[in-house]
Image (spheres, rainbow, N blue to C red):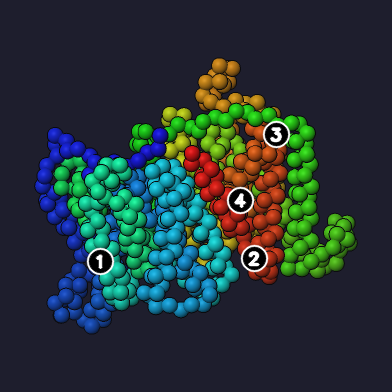
Amino acid sequence: MAVTATTPATRPPTATSRTGAAPVTAALVLLVAALALVDITQGTAAVGAPEVWKAFTGQADPADASVVVASRLPRMTAGLLVGAVLGMAGAALQAVSRNVLASPDTLAVNAGSYFALGLTAAFGLSLPLFASSAFAFAGGLAAAAVVLVLSGLGAGTVRLVLAGSALTLGLTAVTEGLLLLFPRQTEGLYQWNQGSIGQNGFDGVLQMAPIAVVGLVGLLLLARRVDALALGDDAARGLGVPVRATRITAVVLAALLSTAAVTLAGPVGYVGLCAPALVRPLARRFRGFTKSRGFLPAAGLTGAALVLGSDVLLRALVPADVAVSVPTGVVTSLVGAVFLVVMATRVRDTAGTTATERLHIRSRARFLTVTAVLVAVVIGVAIAGVLLGDSKLLLGDVLNWAQGQAGRTVGFVLDTRVPRVLAALFAGAALALAGTLVQAVTRNPLAEPGILGVSGGAALGAVLLVTTVPVAGSWGMAGAAFAGAAASSVLVFGLAARGGFQQNRLVLVGFGVAIAAAALISLLIILTDPFNATKALTWLSGSTYGRSLPDVVPLVAVLAVGSAVAFARRTELDLVSLDEDTPRLLGLGLGRARLGFLALAVLLTATAVAAAGTIGFVGLVAPHAARALVGRQHARVVPVAVLLGAALVCTADLVGRTVIAPAQLGAGLMTAVIGTPYFLYLLVRSRG
């Protein structure tokens, strides 16, 4: 059974509930006002509280007054506006979808806006703020519509998060591809995507304020109908409420609010998720917050407090000259990740693991045929990868190079190209095997290392090493990636193990860890040396650029061990993937087997990330396709999945560096473009 939200309107008053919510609202207003006053006094210039007071009274030095009026006040006002609209947008989305995890982030609204603005910038369109807002609104609304449709209007918690995260990954991959292809036209868009409330004057705030007011007034006018939806669709229709029109109108208004915030400050992450979650306990005590007309303003005030509080905390803990370069959105994303993990561990009616399918037995001839075809495909793709690129070669050139008789030019090309092809092949195989192991242990066909945060942890460990020790070797990179993957996997699988790896808890905790890892990676990239930042960004796109044969050695070793263990323990994999009882009846130590397979999956993921960067969806697509081709017996699934993963990543790498040569796109971006539609297709197929 999916987890759904109990909206404030549906929760009956308890014995401790009181009608007066005015004191609480007044306290929220005072908190926001206090944070706003503190925020005005913070900054790089030596303008403290006395100078701010003199600026307000007209007694300040002109330079100090200019700092307050042109920078501090606009920043504070932007924080108020962005936090308020995101808090109310999240509250509205959660109410109409009856899902506590609905927000502009989980519905991919921010990613849709980012893609729309990236597209307009790539085509060289220089638009005023209002026109940019219109494009962002269209992109965000379209993304939210796709996610809501795929998740059954948001009723399924896991489905909502999976659809939103998958679409976010796909849209972000396409947008980052545009950034790499059109660096001059899209300059500054990556920094904007981190979310910063810093402003240069009041122009942006004044232009976005009317849009925010329209959205806020619209939601307040719609509040009674939204409350009726909380009673259930049938009950709402019985009260004369047009259910579909109300839901669509609320989503459009929430998207409008989110667009105003995104256009003004970029995507300030997860305020729309956290603010309603903080207000919800108040609704249990104060009857005034049980209705949307009280809940929405409280969520708006809480959102403003979150944004301003994050900005104040950042500037209090970090030196001013450093804090100015750290976007507020990084801090709010870290807070949102913690909230998501906590909420995942507290949900009670989490779904169990997926219903186990029967071990379909395919014919041996089919398995041999599929394997032979895939071996031929892998060999063909590898040969094409070696021969094709910005300069085309012949097989004779490769043979001469192997014998040490190639010319200097051909030798240079192959010295750089062969390691890239090998890194793509073995990284794809390792990720596919890791995905097979994770899906077997969790009995969740939609689980994979990227979605569960393991790849994010590995990426964080590797980026930390890249940005602090640029001369680190391949074994050091593999070790750092493994440390990050191990830490994230201990957190994810440790919290999800309670109750037997239930789907909701596993996916939500993994998604929260992935959010935190992405925020920390952005922080490292922003604060590091520009050269190392460029290197980290290129590596994060899943690029095999600059790989050498020593970089591939750790991956080959781990893949060989992992494949041997998986094949030798194929019967245990079959039993673990069945159910909870069968392995125990046959004397298999279920906990020990799970731990061993998960540790192996973490090791495979870490070495793949260290060798080829962040490559998503391979661990999902390859095992799923392998089961469809040869059945569910792991003696056959493992080799077929490994071959499929190798072929997929090598093809993605080949396409990324040949189609638009001499420019290149990372294999991770290409697999995200391929994997996102397939993942969404699986969600549609499994909706029944």
Please say if the residues under marks 2 and 3 sit with CB atoms less than 8 Å apart. no
- Quarter-wise, where is residue 668 in the image? bottom right
Inter-mark Cα distance, 1 to 4: 48 Å
State the residue in front, 218 or 68. 218
**Does residue 9 appear in the picture of this structure?**
yes
Instruction: Of the two numbered discs 1 and 3 on the same chain, state the one appearing first in sequence.
Output: 1
Mark earlier in primary sequence (1, 4): 1
| Residue found at the far bottom of this picture | 62
Q: Is residue 183 above or below residue 567?
A: below
Cα separation between marks 2 and 3: 35 Å
Q: Residue at x 77, y 44 (%)?
A: 373
The numbered mark, 3 or 4, whose residue comes first in the sequence reads 4
Percent of width and height locating residue 515: 44, 51
Q: Count of labels shown?
A: 4
Residue beneath disc 2: 664
Q: Which mark is residue 330?
A: none
Q: Position of residue 604 (x, y in %)?
A: 62, 42
Q: Which mark is residue 610?
A: 4
> Is disc 1 placed on a helix, strand or loop?
helix
Residue 328 occupies quadrant = bottom left
| Label 3 sits on residue | 636
Label 3's element? helix
Label 4 vs label 2, nearer the camera: 2
- Residue kind at label 1, given as amino acid type: Val
* Side of 194 relative to 573 (left or right): left
Looking at the image, is 616 positioned above or below residue 629? below
Element type at marker 2? Answer: loop
Q: Earlier in the sequence, mark 4 or mark 2?
A: 4
**What residue sits right under mark 1 in the picture?**
213
